[in-house]
Amino acid sequence: MAADLNDWTLSFADRTPDCIPSMTFYPETGVLSYVDDAIARGARIAKLHLQVGGFDPADARLDDVWARLADAGMPVVVHAGSGPVKAGYTGPAPFGAVLRRHPRLVAVIAHCGAPEYDGFFALARAYPRVCLDTTMVGTNFFNAMAPLPDALLPDFRELGRDGRVLLGSDFPNIPYPYADQLTALARFDLGDDWLRAVCWNNAAALLDLDPA
């Protein structure tokens, strides 16, 4: 299924201006081969959802894939937190095991790792290529179930200034207007420079996008 998904996403990117070519993968026989094929076809970012996929990111069958992505400096967005429902391989420990083996991996933790913010912020402090994405963070929807702790705001500020907090939205699969995410980030009151970095500059730098 992952190979078929990659064929669709890469074909979509080929015919869609401004779409970043993306791929995914699963711990299975032949995974490195189709990951290499996706990279050869221009994939620039990967995405995994450990909760939906239900697999251990530290599965030995993925070791060569993580090594390949780390060597290539390719970002991988990982839904590794336990929100909205804890699954067998969510939480900071399973993905932390991957980072111990591959500390140069460029990982973007979706939803800032909610609700296990503390553990995922700790991984970002420990590994200089780990980033956090803001999807749903600070929105009224998320604050009702998993608000970002005030104690982490200094780290949120510093990581954003350091290029390691990126705008995420999950648009269009969200239960509120897109603008609510931007309003939520502004509500943290971390400054205009921080907002510019988080909402554009950090991702543009990470993906080496043409400013034009």
Image (cartoon, grey):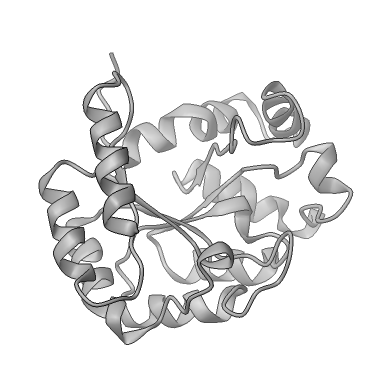
Q: Residue furthest top?
A: 212
Residue 171 x/y as whole percent: 59, 31
Across and down, in percent, residue 191 comes to 65, 29
Identity of the residue drawn at 52% across and 67% down: 50
Q: Is residue 60 above or below residue 91?
A: below
Q: Where, by quadrant of the figure, is residue 169 drawn?
A: top right
Using the rendered view, name the quadrant where residue 21 is placed: top left
**Is 72 left or right of 121, judged from the image as shown?**
left
Q: Is residue 171 above or below residue 44?
A: above
* Residue closer to the observer: 196 or 23: 23
Residue 187, placed above or below residue 103: above
User: Where the C terminus falls, by quadrant?
Assistant: top left
Most extreme residue toward the bottom is 60
Residue furthest right as drawn:
144
Residue 100 appears left or right of 120: left
Residue at 32% in and 39% down:
9
Toward which corner of the image does residue 149 lie, by quadrant?
bottom right
Q: Which residue is painted at 25% across and 38% down in the image?
A: 10
What residue sits 79% from the left and 46% below the top?
Answer: 142
Pinpoint residue 77: horizontal percent, then vertical percent.
44, 53
